[in-house]
Amino acid sequence: MYAANSYVIRLATDADAAALSRLATIDAKPPLEGTILVGELHGDPVAAISLDDDRAISDPFRPTAHLLATMRVRARGLQAVQHMPSLRDRLLAGLPATYRARVAGRRA
């Protein structure tokens, strides 16, 4: 496990193409496509997850399991926002149906 200030999770840019290619090569997996989250440890890209198909690549010579787990949580959050952009709607969707009906009745 790493301290929260030792890693960065961010969306990949065009400048990350070489690093993503290197990660795919050393992990012996095909390159990721689409929107990609990159995980950096101490400034070095060591893991990546495709938001489109949930495939992941990582540096097998570095301990990345905790970082990948954290990245998967972040990826689910980004996918939830794409599915339902309103925070209020997402929070209401998590409540029991009976409570949602009472809340909806107050707005009417």
Image (cartoon, rainbow, N blue to C red):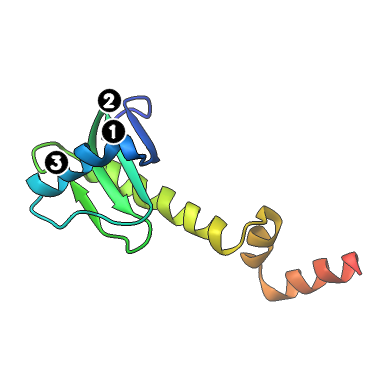
Question: The C terminus lies in which quarter of the figure?
Answer: bottom right
Crowd class of label 1 (few under 14; some 14 to 19; many from 20; radius 10 Å): some
Q: Is residue 50 above or below residue 41?
A: below
Question: If you read the primary sequence from the N terminus, does the residue marked by circle 3 or circle 2 appear first?
Answer: 3
Q: Is residue 21 left or right of residue 104?
A: left
Q: Secondary structure at mark 2?
A: loop
Give the residue pinned by disc 1. Answer: 40
Considering only order in the chain, which callout, 3 or 1, is on the residue closer to the N terminus? 3
Q: Position of residue 55 (x, y in %)?
A: 26, 59
Task: Pinpoint residue 17: horizontal percent, then vertical percent.
Answer: 25, 41
Label 3: which residue?
Answer: 22
Q: How far apart in space, not on screen, are marks 2 and 1 (Cα)?
A: 5 Å
Residue 66 lies in what quarter of the image?
A: top left
Percent position of residue 103, x then y: 81, 66
Question: How far, Cα to Cα, is label 1 from label 3?
Answer: 14 Å
User: Foreground: 35 or 73?
Assistant: 35
- Where does label 2 land, which residue? 43
Q: Amino acid at mark 3?
A: Arg
Q: Secondary structure at mark 3?
A: helix
Disc nearest the viewer among 1 and 3: 3
Whether pointer 3 and pointer 2 mark residues with C-beta atoms closer than 8 Å, the reply is no
Q: Quadrant of residue 107?
A: bottom right
Residue found 15% across the figure and 49% down from its top: 24
User: CB of mark 2 within 8 Å of CB of mark 1?
Assistant: yes
Total number of numbered discs in the rendering: 3
